[in-house]
Amino acid sequence: MKNKKLVMIPGPTPVARSIQDQMGRETVAFGDPNFIKDFKELISDLKTMWRTAGEVFVVAGTGTMAMEMAIANTLKKGDNVLIVSHGFFGDRFIDLCERKGINVDVIASEWGTIVPVEEIESKLKEKTYQALTVTHVDTSTGVCAPVEEIGKMASKFEDTLFIVDGVCATAGEVEYVDDMGIDVLLTGTQKAFGVAPGLGILWAGPKAMERRKSLGTIPEFYVDFDKWLPIMHDPAKYFATPAVNLVWALKESVAIIKEEGLENRYARHQKVAKAMQTALEALGFKILAEKEHRAATLSNVIYPEGIDDAEFRKTLYEEGMVVAGGLGAYAGKMFRLGHMGNIDMHDLVSVIATIERALYKAGHNVELGKGVGILMQELLK
Ligand SMILES: *Cc1c(COP(=O)(O)O)cnc(C)c1O
């Protein structure tokens, strides 16, 4: 019998049955009173749970669209932006901002490490930056930025907005908008929310909304806060057709999160990450991110000597699991393993067991069950 395919890439992540059911519902008119009520409740929950006195936007599109939406509504041509990059997705802001004619300064870390907060602070003192961008978890490195610490520091700079890319973090890593000094938090549905890809979510705090106002008319149309704000306040209004079934799916994901408790969910992600990483290290792998700055949502796993990446991932696939390859200089040297969202104990045990089988089939000296044992010991703590 063939194995089920476990999708353990860093997004899309496994979609729970109850969320899939929402996507399979009969699509109604976006003006349907029940849909309007559901959409309203979703916006209100997102605002309360992630704690902002500002606004929330839920718009059809990917995480990258949400990045563009964040920049379009806060910066204009000729402004200065400081981009803190911990990898591939941090760098994505460079092209995005340069195309708008924004002056870009970048501080990048070596992959696997972070840019120290003091370094960001001294750069912010050099000149006025209208915004600072930080990727909470850079999916290419598995590094988690100290967002709370950066936010505290950055809030001393009145003219600077703190923009956080939470695409691989939100609903998995500890994140609260106003409390952490975040002005714009953006994410997508397919990572720690465990919904299919297709929606961008964006929180804009009071300072960001003031900035939007000061910009007047912006060149962008679809991602303009001003176009969407009336709909977010009253979904009975129309600007562009909401993704009805995905909105329901996200609402179900939020219901799952509420039932678990956001704090419990954060704690679960931390526990799972530590267990996964301890098990993987015991099997001879190395984790790219330095210990103090490891993400809870995914692990970037460097192969032991003698393992061929393409061959290994092909075996994993045959054994019923999909992981992602390494990016940049780490292509061929590591794989990326998502462990975020609505995954359960069955999934976790299977993940390590599948990796053990693939190591065994690669002729690697592996004690079958060793990783699984360590994983369960860690998870039962
Ligand atoms: C996945 C990801 C993105 C891009 O999201 P898409 O939905 O693929 O456009 C941006 N930033 C980070 C940190 C990501 O992990």
Image (tube, helix red, strand yellow):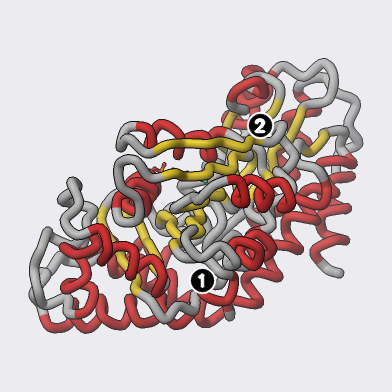
Q: At 53% across and 36% down in the image, what residue appears?
A: 105
Compared across the picture, whether 8 is left or right of 113 comes to left
Q: At 60% across and 61% down in the image, what residue appears?
A: 154
Q: At 59% across and 59% down in the image, what residue appears?
A: 343
Q: Residue 30, position in %: x, y?
A: 11, 69
Question: Does 364 appear above or below 369?
Answer: above
Q: Ligand 1: does it lie within 8 Å of the C-beta at label 1?
A: no
Q: Residue under circle 1?
A: 177
Looking at numbered disc 1 in the image, what kind of residue is underneath it?
Answer: Val
Picture quadrant of residue 203: bottom left
Assign the C terminus to one quadrant of the image.
Answer: bottom right
Q: How many marks?
A: 2
Question: Does 228 appear above or below 78?
Answer: below
Q: Ligand 1: does it lie within 8 Å of the C-beta at label 2?
A: no
Q: Residue 70, position in %: x, y?
A: 36, 54
Picture quadrant of residue 60: bottom left
Q: Which of the two discs, 1 and 2, labels the residue nearer the N terminus?
A: 1
Q: Residue under circle 2?
A: 335
**Residue 6 shows up from this direction:** no
Q: At 60% across and 23% down in the image, what residue appears?
A: 328
Q: Secondary structure at mark 2?
A: strand
Question: Does 282 appear above or below 366?
Answer: below
Which is nearer the eye, 223 or 245? 223
Looking at numbered disc 2 in the image, what kind of residue is underneath it?
Answer: Phe
Q: Residue 197, position in %: x, y?
A: 36, 50
Q: Secondary structure at mark 1?
A: loop
